[in-house]
Image: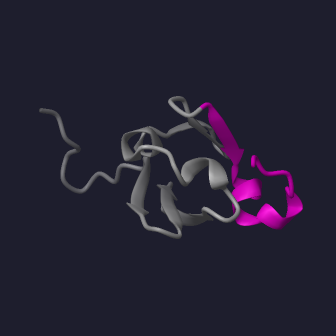
Amino acid sequence: MNSSLPGIPSSGTEITNVSSHGLWLLSDGCEYFLAFEDFPWFKEAAIGKILNVELVSPHHFYWPDLDIDLGIDSIVHPERYPLKAR
């Protein structure tokens, strides 16, 4: 098993929590909340599929198991992106 050396910060991308209201995404020291109201694609998804998230560029996330890709701007300002899956 490999792990980071003590004292060397590792910046990754991960889901830190999932509740009945949404999920929390941590990336490069910033935490983002994705409410299921704004991101309905995640609400019925299996936890394992939600946890499989990749940072594909500095401001872009991809969930390969769900075929969902989101930019940070759409996460921070979902009101600017009104189209949602039904």
Would you say 26 lies left or right of 85 here? left
Q: Nearer the viewer, residue 11 or 69?
A: 69
Residue found 43% across the figure and 54% down from its top = 15
User: Residue at left 55%, top 54%?
Assistant: 43
**Percent of width and height locating residue 26:** 48, 58
Tell me what residue is drawn at x 64 percent, y 37 percent.
68
* Magenta segment includes 71: yes
Residue shown at the point (24%, 56%) measured from the top left = 7
* Rendered-image quadrant of the N terminus: top left
76 inside magenta stretch: yes
Position of residue 76 relative to residue 28, above or below, is: below
Occupied quadrant, residue 16:
bottom left
Q: Which residues are magenta?
A: 67-86
| Outermost residue toward the front in this view | 86
Above or below — where is 85 with respect to 19?
Answer: above
State the image coordinates of residue 12 (x, y, percent, origin top left). Answer: 43, 47
Q: Report whether 45 appears left or right of 6.
A: right
Asked whether 53 or 55 is in front, the reply is: 53
- Residue 51 place in picture, x, y as percent: 41, 45
Q: Left or right: where does residue 14 sit relative to residue 2?
A: right
